[in-house]
Amino acid sequence: MAKQTESPVTFNAGEALARYTRVKLGTTGRDVVYADQADSGAYIGSTIFDVALGDNVAIVLKTSAKTFKGTANGAISDKAAVYAGNDGKISASVSGNQIGIAVQAAGADGDIIEYLGTGF
């Protein structure tokens, strides 16, 4: 029987995942892995906590009506368009689809900032 789940949704970690990084579906419909730069259209949402391989992981779906926390892969200006970066990070470098707009600045790789997701 089909079910409806509201965000955040629990999946299995297909690899060790850092908090506030973007993920995509893995080899099954119930596991997730990092969404890399080339996966800007395939990502489904963002992690909330650090998790180990095989652990349950809470994912805030990208279609949620909220802002997101993201891990920057370098400097990002306030109000800048953000794009997919590697290892689930967000980037100011134009690559693939725009995935959001930064609502605060990041000074360096690893900074956690808030951004508005573009949804679909």
Image (spheres, rainbow, N blue to C red):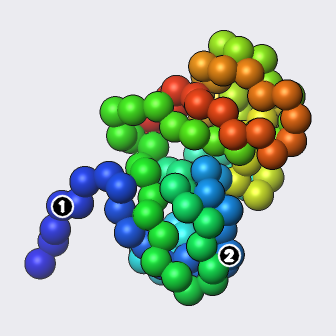
Residue 97 shows in the view: no
Q: Position of residue 7 (x, y in %)?
A: 32, 52
What is the quadrant of the C terminus in the image?
top left
Query: Which residue has dot 1 on it?
Result: 4
Q: Position of residue 77 (x, y in %)?
A: 77, 17
Local SS, label 1: loop
Which residue is drawn at the image coordinates 41% and 49% (left, top)?
61
Q: Position of residue 78 (x, y in %)?
A: 71, 15
What is the quadrant of the N terminus in the image?
bottom left
The image shows residue 83, relative to residue 86, as above or below, that is above
Residue farthest toward the top in the current orientation of the protein = 79
The image shows residue 9, relative to residue 113, as above or below, that is below
Nearer-the-camera pick, 118 or 42: 118
- Type of the residue with mark 2: Ala
Alpha carbons under labels 2 and 1: distance apart: 27 Å
Residue 105 shows in the view: yes
The image shows residue 14, relative to residue 5, as above or below, that is below
Q: Position of residue 49 (x, y in %)?
A: 55, 61
Query: Which residue has dot 2 on it?
Result: 16
